[in-house]
Amino acid sequence: MSIVTIDRDGDIAVVTVNNPPVNALSQALRQGLWDAAEALDVEQGIRAVVLICAGRTFIAGADVSEFGKPPMEPHLPDLVGRIETATKPWIAAIHGSALGGGFEVAMGCRFRVALDSASVGLPEVTLGIVPGASGTVRTPRLAGVEAAVELVTTGRPVKAPRAAQMGLVDAVVSGDLRAEAIAFARTALEKPLPPATSARPIAAPEPGFWEAQETAIARRAKGEVAPLRALASIRRATEVPFAEAMAFERATFLDLRGSDQAAALRHIFFAERAAPRPGHLADVAPLPLRTAAVIGGGTMGAGIAAALRDAGLPVTLIERDAEAVERGLANLRGIYAGAVKRGKLTEAQVEARMSGVTAGSDYSALADVDLVIEAVFEEIGVKRAVFEQLGRVCRPDAVLATNTSYLDPRAIAEGLRNPARFIGLHFFSPANVMKLLEIVPTPDTAPETLATGFALGRMLGKIPVQAGICEGFIGNRILKRYRAEAEAIVRQGTAIAAVDKAMRDYGFAMGPFEAQDLGGLDIAYLQREGARAAGQAVHETLGDILVRAGRKGQKTGGGWYDYLPGDRSPKPSDAVAALLAAHIQPGAALDSAAISARMVGAMADEGRKILDEGIAQRASDIDLVEVHGYGFPRWRGGPMFAA
Ligand code: 3H9
């Protein structure tokens, strides 16, 4: 089938786009649509044109893989204009997602009809750019300034019913989209046509609107430039004639397209799409995943259970006794109560989620599950005892996974019958929210088991990254190095608060010391103490000194900083200065740029070692770990990309 085909239903032409996988607007597709518009303009007997797509979605946008190359004709803004000025009205028939250039094409059409399951959006800012084919100019004409600002500056798509309320689509239908769109066209032809989108007026917003938006967006965007540039482009569209606004948008688009931030965001975009289906597992079929179990109902176990339930898997939750079972269930309910409070789930949905959970302390309930994830205390003896029981009760082909974050999975699996089905699945807390999933095979893990880990990642909507065995796998190993570098900078005479500020300025939500105060300094301290007790040479850190002085972070009223009761804002601490004074060489304090360069440089250096040792498969996997598990600013592309 060619990329654009035309067929007819009486006096309505149907233009079908077929450019898998997502009907992206490659040069060939743009040309195909242009040619269709030319042909249909002069075809006798045709009164309207339905534009519809084959495959899983409407046009999902410009072809991102063309962004590194010089733009080729026909340019998308011209194509959108060509469709808008066609002699017969075009009707976009939307299923799946109409995104970016795809929605811009739809806005060039006289009408938009969408399936109730469809969504529309302008996600360009998530790629570090602004819409480049009238998104900032036509959207305010179609749906008003406020809707345009929401759609364009957040980049978040909206579902068809809301899109209809906002004025972005004209009709929401269910069932046979093609038939519905044709019927819509026939009805529309009985009345005078509405003006083309570009010819519609824009109502001016309330006084102070732009200033308020600017402040809010700047706060949200931190160092990301595209959202504010997008806002400026919408504002311009309300102040100057259409053609002038288009020229302004195009110039902004082309300027940002070549920017470092856009390159970084494209890098993450493609890394995210490559991660769930690694090439080396292309020919390996995963095992079926119909049921799952979680051992341990603490914060981690309950979070994993919630993630599994959210994906629709029935879950068995095992704890050691009746009391612990109740606690585990309460933890799970607590997670869902939070989701209800934030408007993410309804009470009825929560009931449905909870009704899919069977909880108890009897391992024999696991005789037929496909997957078990252990999330008990990080203590090798406790974990081994769990796997000893699992080895006895589970089916020989059930996948058995540990959620350890620091222990050696090989040691946990020792003595397990059929170790080929054993694997590490390292979730990040809160496990039902955080996207990252480190998948850690042992030398005995079978390819099918590994492929099943990735299948689980896809099922849960996670970003799965394969990691080899070493202390901390990829993420926590880099975190350790990152914290060590932060301490080294402080030892050399830069203030603690200056390091935190530098990393916030770089784009992290929190600096390394503030983050430790929030999470607690004692966890890493206890690990170091454990290693020391086992005879390893672990040198004393500044954090050790603070913990020994009772400063474990916010929960003890102080860590790297002091905190006033009921106030989470960090205050530089004289007590800390006194405790650490002997370990700090007075020297020249580093400035912000020098601090972040050293911190990110250290992360990248550790990343290179991780790659050299084969712990990570690709540099982009390391970037995904940092962006999705450790708050590395997405628009910087991750430490490997940034370095
Ligand atoms: C834009 O439009 C700029 C204009 O304003 C101005 C221009 C002048 N290009 O996500 P999936 C590939 S900016 C190229 O797994 P799903 C993807 O890499 C663009 N390739 O599918 C993957 O390839 P592979 C604005 C693309 O069903 C395959 O398609 N648009 C593009 O889970 C499947 O992807 C966006 O930002 C693309 N635009 O989700 C939309 N999109 O199979 C981005 C996808 O080789 N796309 N691919 O690994 C999406 O959000 C999702 O792909 C979508 C489908 C929701 C559509």
Image (spheres, rainbow, N blue to C red):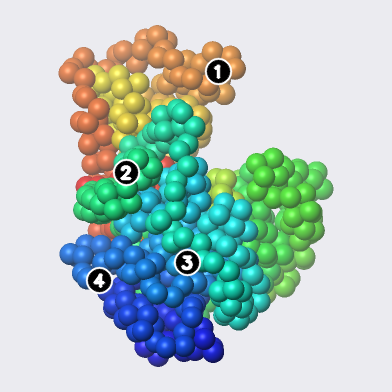
Mark before the other along the chain sequence, 3 or 2 = 3
Residue 574: horizontal and vertical position, in percent?
Answer: 40, 9
Please state if 529 lies on the left or on the right of 337 as rendered. left
Residue 74 lies, with reference to residue 475, above or below; the image says below
Residue 519: horizontal and vertical position, in percent?
Answer: 51, 33
The residue beneath circle 1 is: 567
Residue 557 lies, with reference to residue 322, above or below; the image says above
Q: Nearer the viewer, residue 65 or 131?
A: 131
| Residue under the point 61% across and 65% down | 171
| Residue under the point 66% across and 55% down | 305
Under mark 3, the amino acid is Arg
Q: Residue furthest right?
A: 322
- Among the 4 quarters of the image, the one containing residue 591: top left
Under mark 1, the amino acid is Asp
Secondary element type, mark 4:
loop
Q: Distance between the residues labelled 2 and 1?
A: 48 Å
The quadrant in which the N terminus is found is: bottom left
Q: Which mark is residue 577?
A: none
Secondary element type, mark 2:
loop
Q: Distance between the residues labelled 4 and 3?
A: 21 Å
Q: Residue 240 carries which label?
A: 2
Q: How far apart are marks 1 and 3 (CA)?
A: 55 Å
Q: Distance between the residues labelled 3 and 2?
A: 23 Å
The residue beneath circle 4 is: 74
How crowded pointer 2 is (Cα within 10 Å; few <14, some 14-19, many 20+) is rated as few
Mark before the other along the chain sequence, 2 or 1 = 2
Q: Are marks 3 and 2 in contact (CB under 8 Å)?
A: no
Mark 1 Cβ and ligand 1 under 8 Å apart: no
Mark 2 Cβ and ligand 1 under 8 Å apart: no
The residue beneath circle 3 is: 110
